[in-house]
Amino acid sequence: LKGEKARTDCLVAVFVPAPGEWSFSEVTKSPINDAPSVAAVLHSDTGTSSFNIGCNEGKLYLMFDMHMYLSTMHRHFYPIIYRVDSEPAVDCTVEEAPQACYGWELNAANNGAGIWGNSDEFIQEIKGGKKLTVRVHNISGDEKTAVFTLKDVASTYEKVKSICTFAEPAATEGEATP
C-alpha cells in the first residue's frame, strides 16, 4: 500500500501543476459558428478544486469547480463566500448580498459556481492578491473550502478574453449585412 500511495502521489504531481500555475486547454472552434472555446485552470493548493477562466463558444465565464454536488433554491443566485488575502470576507450567502457578489450562479453540472459573462469586476478585485479562499455550501449543509495561490490572474484573464473575443466576419464590399 505504501508503494501504491507513492505511485499515486507521483501521478498526481505529473498532472496537477504547482500552486499558482495556470494550465490552458487547447483552443477549439464551434462547428456552428467558429466561435472559440478555451479554459485556463488553476488548481487549489490541495488540488481538490479548481478556478477556471474560460469561454465556451465565445461566451466568457469564470467558475470555481469544487468537485462536489452543489444545490440551491435559486438557480440564478449561489451562496458563496470568498476572501482575498487578509481582507474581510465577502459573504454572498443571502440574496441581499453586497454588490460585490456579482451574480454567482450554478453551472449546468451543479458542481461549480461562477459568473457567466463579464467577470471584469471580480478579476479587478482579486488581481493583486496572493491567496484567494472560496467557500461554498449546498442546501443539504455540505460545505467545501478551497484556497488558491494567485499568480498572473489579470494576464490570464486578458489572454482568455482576447482568445474568446468573437466577432461576426466582416461583410465583403457590396454584400448586405443583416
Image (cartoon, helix red, strand yellow):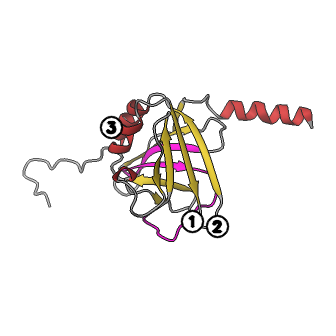
Report helix, strand or loop for mark 1: loop
Say whether disc 1 or disc 3 marks the residue closer to the N-terminus: 1
Which of the pair 120/99 is nearer the observer?
99
Image coordinates of residue 30 in percent, x first then y, are: 40, 52
Do labels 1 and 3 touch, CB within 8 Å? no
Task: Give the residue type at disc 2.
Answer: Ser
Residue at which label 1 appears = 71
Q: Is 62 left or right of 133, judged from the image as shown?
A: left
Report helix, strand or loop for mark 2: loop
Image coordinates of residue 166 in percent, x first then y, are: 29, 47
Which of the pair 114/59 is nearer the observer?
114
Q: Is residue 57 magenta?
A: yes
Disc number lying in front (2 or 3): 2
Q: Is residue 67 above or below residue 72?
A: above
Q: Is residue 160 magenta?
A: no
Residue at which label 2 appears = 140
**Which residue does the image show at 54% across and 29% down from the upper left?**
21
User: How many other residues sit within 10 Å of disc 1, few (<14), some (14-19) or many (≥20)?
Assistant: many
Residue at which label 3 appears = 162
CA separation in Å, label 2 and label 3: 39 Å
CA separation in Å, label 2 and label 1: 8 Å
Say whether disc 2 or disc 3 marks the residue closer to the N-terminus: 2
Image coordinates of residue 177 in percent, x first then y, are: 13, 57
**Which residue does the image show at 64% across and 34% down from the upper left?**
16
